[in-house]
Amino acid sequence: MDVQTANNDYDQLVFRLERNHRCVLRMVRKLNSYQFEPKSPQGFDKIKEIKQGFNQLAKDQLLLFNNLQKQLLDPEAAYEQVKLSLKKFNLMEQKVAAYILGDM
């Protein structure tokens, strides 16, 4: 039963990471649209920082996803890394919201 539970946990982590990665890619596409084009010099700096953050998050998620698929991480470490990735995504979402509400 423990092996089956561990495999199920890994599958859930991979699924969660895939879903979050799709959200990251969607956000990057939205940020590249004219709808979010900055209107001030500070806005250009903010949007550049946000885009770089999302691009780095996407790269980190792909690396984590590959490690999960190859089962290179023990379940506890994998769970913590996925949680950290989700926290980073939430922080980036907050930055986007602040950008949209503030300087656009």
Image (cartoon, helix red, strand yellow):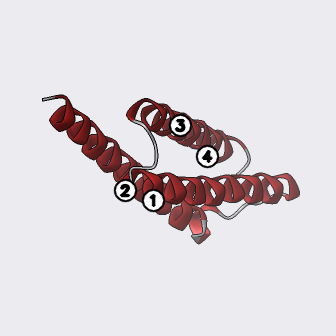
Kindly identify the amino acid type of the residue bearing the numbered disc 3.
Asn
Q: Secondary structure at mark 4?
A: helix
Q: Secondary structure at mark 3?
A: helix
Answer with left or right where residue 76 lies relative to residue 58: left
Q: Secondary structure at mark 1?
A: helix
Answer with left or right where residue 51 lies relative to residue 41: left
Mark 2 and mark 4: Cα distance apart in space: 30 Å
Does the CB distance between marks 2 and 1 fall below 8 Å?
Answer: yes
Q: Nearer the viewer, residue 41 or 19?
A: 19
Kindly identify the amino acid type of the residue bearing the numbered disc 2.
Gln
Outermost residue on the right side: it is 41
Q: Which residue is mark 4?
A: 96
Observer-side mark, 2 or 4, equals: 2
Q: Earlier in the sequence, mark 1 or mark 4?
A: 1
Does the CB distance between marks 1 and 4 fall below 8 Å?
Answer: no
Observer-side mark, 3 or 4, equals: 3
Residue at the location (39% across, 57% down)? 70
Mark 2 and mark 1: Cα distance apart in space: 5 Å
- Viewer can see residue 27: no
46, above or below 6, in the image: below
- Viewer can see residue 2: yes
Mark 1 and mark 4: Cα distance apart in space: 27 Å
The image quadrant that residue 78 belongs to is top left
Crowding around mark 3 (Cα neighbors within 10 Å: few <14, some 14 to 19, many 20+) is few
Residue at the location (59% across, 41% down)? 97
Q: Which mark is residue 66?
A: 1
Q: Secondary structure at mark 2?
A: helix
Kindly identify the amino acid type of the residue bearing the numbered disc 1.
Asn
Give coordinates of residue 8: x percent, y percent: 21, 39
Q: Which mark is residue 69?
A: 2
Q: Which residue is mark 3?
A: 90
Mark 2 and mark 3: Cα distance apart in space: 24 Å
